[in-house]
Image: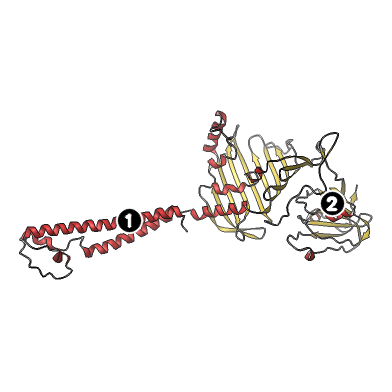
Amino acid sequence: MFHITRYLVVELVVLAGFGLGIAIFYWMRGRRRQRARRLAVAGGAAPLREVIDRKRPTTLEVLPIPEKKKATLREAIFSRRRMRALLLVAVAFVLLGGFGVAAYLNSGYRTQTYAKKTVARMASAPSYRAVGRDTENDVNTVKEVLEQFLYVAPDSVWTHYRTTARRPGMEGTVAIDCADKEIVVVGSTRYQRCNDAGSSTKGWVVDSFDTNVLHSELFQPWVRFLWCLKVNEQDATEEIKGVVNQVFTCRVRNEQEATTIWQRKAGENKLDGKSEAARQRFLTETVVDITVWVRETDGYIGRFAMTKTSPGTLGPKTETVDYVYSEFGEIAPIAAPANETPQEDQASGNATSQVRYRTATINGQRFNIEVADDDAKRTSGFSKRAIIPDNSGMLFVFPKEDSWKFWMKDVLVPLDAIYMDRRGTIVDIITMPTQPGVPDSMLRVYTPSAPALYVLEVNASLADKYGFEVGMVVGLQ
């Protein structure tokens, strides 16, 4: 379907063509009549309209016409009969030309409209999971952020990321802020915790947060789909997490990308000289290419990738972004960290956590664990936890050995349940996938093959990854 503005332009062109054709027809017809009158006057005869048009026999007496004028009595090129055919040809030509102009003006419009609908669809998504990486590479440092975040509209997010940095040509890492960090944003409150060993900050630290950033390019890089010069649709489709995706590529307008770096403050009409010079260089030298995978089933973005090369102080800087999106509308609302309500330490004024950490070691792999040793803690477990680090787990301690049953009520992350007897020997390992949207009465209940006193829950697939087997002994400290 044509864009309404461009369609009107094409219609005006077509109508103008019609009007021009009709005007030419009547103009030539008028000239023909005038010529006929002149000939009639010159030959002393009555008007020769009937003779020239040859439409019907004349009953008028035609006076002799001088010999030199006889040739002019032949049918005029622009006679009424011939003008009708010419007019039809002109109309057909105008129509074909109009549609050609329409096709030219609307080339790429379908994909541009598709991009607008896709971005609007993503912006209205109630929730989703994003997993990916953001890498910056310049002459000094290569910095990589591995990130996983749950976005729950309109102002909640739980993000867990690990940052690494190294100098080009060196394997060692460069000291940076926090390599293993978690952030939870609920409303205008932000909870932060650094999981680095030896970190000076213990537990969750709380501060205020501007939720507008959740709707910026930092958390929504796919808005660049709207900034494309021209959207190109690829012929082949790709499957991501079992869903078929249509692939689009395009180059982003530098003027739009510059707004992610230089944002004028309210009331200011221009940047300072240094910033304006850097911005102008950015506009002329930067290249931003993106690839967008759009799910055919629901119109959400299944994957977004970007490569941006921009000028740096000492040389060009390259940034790559690659995120996979899934679980649209399946994530429960995010609350403050479960069982870890920040409390104010009277002495230091810092937030501290009530959680007790211990360690469990299996086949040489050590986990930092939370202990659930009463009914309340065992009931909540890992429910409503958006992210569980791979080096963390929860140890359930029961009053006696028994075939304790588990289910995945309100659990957002698939888990491995490792059952142990009183000596810490593994007696069973069960993988428990999530069951979003399933009523409690329909949830699957998992029962071990042997009685257990302890159950250690970790991220699913880790048991296979590290080769955990029945009969191994778990070291608890």
**Residue 59 falls in image quadrant:** bottom left
Horizontal and vertical percent position of residue 318? 61, 40
Horizontal and vertical percent position of residue 20? 29, 55
**Residue 416 falls in image quadrant:** bottom right
Q: How crowded is mark 1: few (under 14 residues within 10 Å), some or many (20 or more)?
A: some
> Residue at coordinates 13% horizontally, 60% vertically from top-left?
36
Tell me the amino acid under the disc marked 1.
Gly
Horizontal and vertical percent position of residue 426? 89, 57
What residue is disc 1 on?
A: 17
Task: Kindly indicate whether the residue at mark 1 contacts the one at mark 2 (C-beta within 8 angstroms).
Answer: no
The extreme top residue here reads: 273
**Residue 19 falls in image quadrant:** bottom left
In this view, 58 is above or below 215: below
Image disc number at residue 477 = none
Distance in Å between CA atoms under marks 2 and 1: 78 Å
> Residue at coordinates 53% horizontally, 43% vertically from top-left?
253
In this view, 465 is above or below 167: below
What residue is disc 2 on?
A: 394
> Residue at coordinates 12% horizontally, 69% vertically from top-left?
58
Q: Is mark 2 on a helix, strand or loop?
A: strand
